Amino acid sequence: MRVKCLIIGSGPAGYTAAIYASRANLSPVLIEGPQLGGQLTTTTEVENFPGYPDGVEPFTMMDDMRRQAERFGTQFVSGIVTKVDFSANPKKVIVEDEQEYEADAVIIATGASAKYLGIESERTYRGRGVSACATCDGFFYRKKTVAVVGGGDTACEEASYLAGLCEKVYMIVRKPFLRASEIMQQRVLNNPKIEVLFEHNTLQLTGEGKVQGADLIFRKGEPDEEIRHIDIDGFFLAIGHHPNTELFKDFLKRDAEGYIIVDGDSPRTNVPGVFAAGDCADPHYRQAIVAAGSGAKAAIEADKYIKTLS
Ligand code: NDP
């Protein structure tokens, strides 16, 4: 299928790009990918997106964006992009190894995915007590004890959410302070169900067939270093994300962490006609509103680029 503008990803960046591209008469096709609505749908409530003074449920917000794009003619394709070829014009994008799209302009809005610590037992217990999404899996730990790893906004948000369901929540934080915003820190520190374990790292998870505990090291390398054990039923990772950009590595310049390198504050990549928007190209801000803004920029740039072709 031949299209003017193809968008990969269904988070705030992808949907906003679709709204702008469809209103510019580019008749975009948007490939929705493995997680409809993007990362935002793994959080509980969005309180900081302008226009929602009482907060909004993430699925509602993403569905609103999708319907807005649909209203102006965006076509949606469910599936995962398995291959791309940006070596010539038109650019080729292959979905699920079979459906081939040819596009004048491609907007990449593939977002980022949760990071894991990289310890052996994390793999052993994945799906049996280890999770990277409290909203998805928290329900299974009602009235139980869990740990959340990380000291950023995600960790605080996950810990607060889990405290609403669980008996007790530990936060395992490697530094002597939290990195999260002040308001999120206060929510955690004032919650009697949450115990923050500062200066702790996880050595391993333990348990018979499922997570039942974790061995932690307190103040590693210091004279008062100590191994401590906590009994837990669930272990939630909230230590950041890595960008979903592997697929593009043969064509696009990326930084050491895999974020797509764009030209200054524009969404232009090193390949003319290929644009990157949202968290796949943003190691700094990683906010829905910022992603949405960059999606708008990408569609405006795609429109300009397509006009140069005729
Ligand atoms: P961050 O990068 O902000 O925080 C990651 C946390 O994980 C840090 O405390 C970091 O520790 C810790 N960490 C990283 N690697 C390890 C490791 N190997 N072992 C132990 N701990 C580790 O990621 P977030 O996902 O929390 O947030 C990303 C961005 O999204 C931020 O800009 C944040 O503000 C934003 N955000 C905003 C929300 C909101 O406003 N509602 C909600 C969620 C996210 P250290 O501090 O030592 O580096």
Image (cartoon, rainbow, N blue to C red):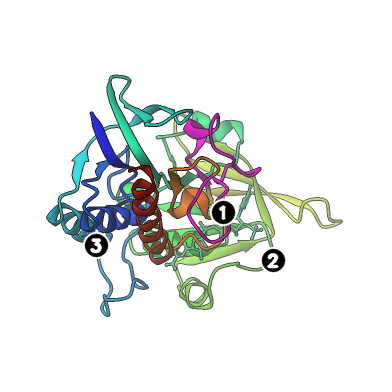
Which amino acid type is shown beneath numbered disc 3?
Met
Q: Is residue 217 visible?
A: yes
- Element marked by disc 1: loop
Answer with left or right where residue 67 lies relative to residue 168.
Answer: left
Q: Earlier in the sequence, mark 2 or mark 1?
A: 2
Answer with left or right where residue 54 lies relative to residue 120.
Answer: left
Query: Residue 308 appears at what percent x and percent y?
Result: 39, 47
Q: How many C-alpha atoms fall within 10 Å of the one at disc 3: few (<14), some, or many (≥20)? A: many
Residue 81: say if magenta.
no
Query: Residue 231 appears at what percent x and percent y?
Result: 52, 48
Which amino acid type is shown beneath numbered disc 2?
Pro
- Dominant secondary structure (helix, strand or loop) of the stretch shown in magenta: loop
For the residue pair 308 and 178, the one nearer the viewer reads as 308
Tell me the tag on residue 176: 2
Residue 288 vertical placement versus 234 (above, below): below
In what quadrant does ligand 1 lie? bottom right
Region of the chain picked out in magenta, as a range: 242-269
Question: Which residue ends up furthest to the bottom in the rendered image?
Answer: 53
Which residue carries the number 3 mark?
61
Which residue carries the number 1 mark?
263
Residue at the spot x=49%, y=71% of the render? 188
Tell me the tag on residue 190: none
Q: Is residue 233 visible?
A: no
Distance in Å between CA atoms under marks 2 and 3: 36 Å
Which amino acid type is shown beneath numbered disc 1?
Asp
Q: How many marks?
A: 3
